[in-house]
Amino acid sequence: MSEASAGPLKKTPLHGLHTRLGARMAEFGGYDMPIQYADGIMAEHNWTRANAGLFDVSHMGPSFLALPELGGKTPEECDEAHRKVSALVEKLVPSDITGLAPGKVQLTVLLNENGGIIDDLMIGRPADPARAGMLYIVVNAGTKENDFALIAKAAQGEAELRRADDRALIALQGPKAEEVVAGIFPQAVALTFMNFIRLEHTDYGRVLITRCGYTGEDGFEILVPAEQAEAFANRLLSDDRVRLIGLGARDSLRLEAGLCLYGHDLDETKTPVAASLSWMISKARRERGDFPGAQRILGELKSGVPSKRVGVKPLGRAPAREGTEIQNDAGETIGVITSGGFGPTVNGPVAQGYVDTTYARAGTPVKLLVRGKQLDAEIATLPFVPARYKR
Amino acid sequence: MTTYYTNEHEWISVDGDVGTVGITKFAAEKLGDVVFVELPDAGKAVKKDADMAVVESVKAASDVYAPVTGEIVEGNAAIVDEPAKVNEDPEGAGWFVKIKLADKGQLSGLMDKAAYDAFCATQ
């Protein structure tokens, strides 16, 4: 996202570390963020796929939605508290938050009344029964003010939304992330993909660790108090397996992993069905039909959508960037690229976009209009690089 | 051979009426890892300050402008095959094209090395 923001750019708790280490900084989501460090995007990308990459993602919006009283005396009371807080966010999302197991996080979307995607976000249910009635919610940087306002409004009078602006969010991604994390938080090793725990660490205080990420690799996103962020980052960086990775490589990694970037692959004109995210719409919610835009979305689930998000593989060497027109053999417009670039692991161009559903099957040949020339491409299965999540 | 520079960060090294053109070290560093290069075919007429070639990094595509008017004599196939050469040796083996100059007088409007270095310091 490159939404222009009024006033000076915001800084994350690791801003000083980035500039000291020679990061090339640029605006992202209203923050002054590291795009790359001295090694460059290609080396950072490859490092993450082979070792462990440290990403400052503190620009994102972690928060907690909590009932006035948390926990319960019995498991039934805890479940009831969870149901109560979940019902508040289920007014905005199509996923089964009520049905989340303790300790589980879910990727979902905030929907407008037409079923368009306002943002994609993560919602988690704490494992600790004493915290039943609380949800951990992480939204995107560029959209967080609006998202937080929507969630707070949906919860008004019932639960309080507490922004975790006093924390830093640090992602550690790659095949060696687990070994590195094991040395600091041994309890986190037992986590599987899309689960989180809260713990108290003698050096870093209250820490929340989620096994998830945005690279297709195994990894963790770790929420630490802002005052401890730099000490924590330095501890990770003192390990030879860990290097700092900027947003440039974060983008090429997520693109190869087939993941969406809000404001590019997702926006309010797209429904989860068009975005090929129908898996987010749980069975229970489909049956109840009680989420924003349900009528349209249920219709699309039944009858299909005119166009949908797909992977697009340019067959030559030329990358196809966002906005590139997708054509059929006859030169008719059948879609548009929403994010595209070079995939260092694929060692070639990769892209995703929206095409007329008739052309959406993997392997379908299409043309990309790049600088006035029709380049050969085909519809590809996502992800381009197989995910290595720890299930 | 004299080398001249543009404020779009191209260099042109002139030998007789043929100039070898590339992007400067400064530009290559700013771009980052080059992953794709598109060059004009031999025989193509190019116009001073008009886009002539394309260079793409992981993140973005950029135009390369012709520093002078003339005709393309040759493109550097080595950087098409191996775009990383542009980063390795931008002002040497990573050259882009050779142009037959139409008007050597256009060179006087370009910067010399000292002027270009001073220009980069302001960027």
Image (cartoon, helix red, strand yellow):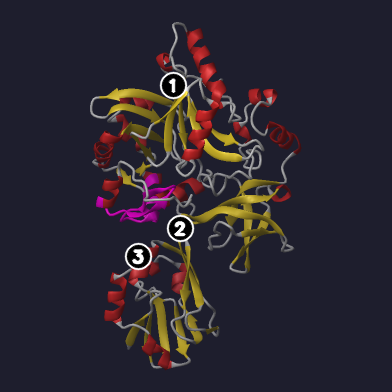
Q: Quadrant of residue A116?
A: top right
Q: Is residue A106 visible?
A: no
Label 1: few (<14), some or many (≥20) within 10 Å?
A: many
Amino acid type at mark 1: Pro
At a point 60% along the width and 43% down the height, the residue shown is A268
Instruction: Name the quarter where the C terminus of chain B is drawn.
Output: bottom left
Q: Quadrant of residue B1?
A: bottom left
- Which residue is the site of mark 3? B29
Task: State whether residue A50 is above or below residue A284.
Answer: below
At a point 60% along the width and 51% down the height, the residue shown is A353
Q: Position of residue A211 (x, y in %)?
A: 42, 31
Identify the mark at residue A174; answer none if there is no mark: none
Disc 2 element: loop
**Gap between marks 1 and 2, in whole Å?**
38 Å
Is A207 situated left or right of A335 in this image? left
Identify the mark at residue B59; answer none if there is no mark: 2
Is residue A42 rendered magenta in the image? yes
Label 2: few (<14), some or many (≥20) within 10 Å?
A: many
Q: Is residue A115 visible?
A: yes
Which numbered disc, 1 or 3, marks the residue closer to the eye? Answer: 1
| Tally of marks | 3
- The magenta stretch is A20-48
Disc 3 element: helix
At a point 26% along the width and 43% down the height, the residue shown is A240
Q: Seen from this angle, which residue lies furthest right? A: A303
- Which residue is the site of mark 1? A126
Whichever of labels 3 and 2 marks the residue nearer the N terminus, that label is 3
Disc 1 element: loop
Q: Nearer the viewer, residue A25 or A170?
A: A25
The chain letter under disc 3 is B
